[in-house]
Amino acid sequence: MRDMVLKAVAQPPKIFWGPVLPVVLNMGLQFPMMFMAMGIWNINPLMFIISILIGHGAVVVAGTKDPHLSAMIQAFGQTNKVSTNIYSEKGNKFEP
């Protein structure tokens, strides 16, 4: 049991050797752009496939440097919220 917990914490999930969230963002943005460019302007998809591979390579390199990149992106999204002040104060105040 302890071995499974340590493995889940120490080795976050990966897709094609890269962290899940950046890989999904990369593929989710570049594939629709490729298909739209192919349909609208009749562009050769080889340019997009090369850019997808370069982007994925950059994500894999960033993921090997910091394997918890997905967790850091999710934590930044949850904590980067603008607080509203009840009273007019200079800066952000976290108490009423």
Image: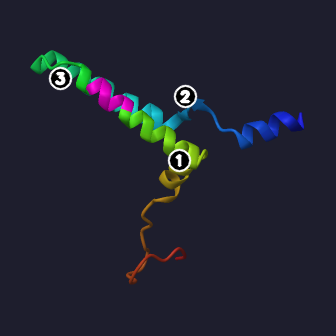
Q: Quadrant of residue 55?
A: top left
Precedes in sequence: disc 3 or disc 2: 2
Q: Quadrant of residue 37?
A: top left
Residue 56 position within the rendered picture, expressed as x and y whole percent measured from the top left: 42, 34
Left or right: residue 43 versus residue 49 is left
Amino acid type at circle 2 is Ile
Q: Nearer the viewer, mark 2 or mark 1?
A: 2
Residue 73 position within the rendered picture, expressed as x and y whole percent measured from the top left: 50, 49
Left or right: residue 37 versus residue 2 is left
Precedes in sequence: disc 2 or disc 1: 2
Residue on which the image places disc 3: 37
Quarter of the figure that contains the N terminus: top right
Disc 3 to disc 2, C-alpha distance: 26 Å
- Tell me the element at label 3: helix
Residue 71 colored in magenta in the image = no
Disc 2 to disc 1, C-alpha distance: 17 Å
Q: Which mark is residue 74?
A: 1
Left or right: residue 60 versus residue 37 is right
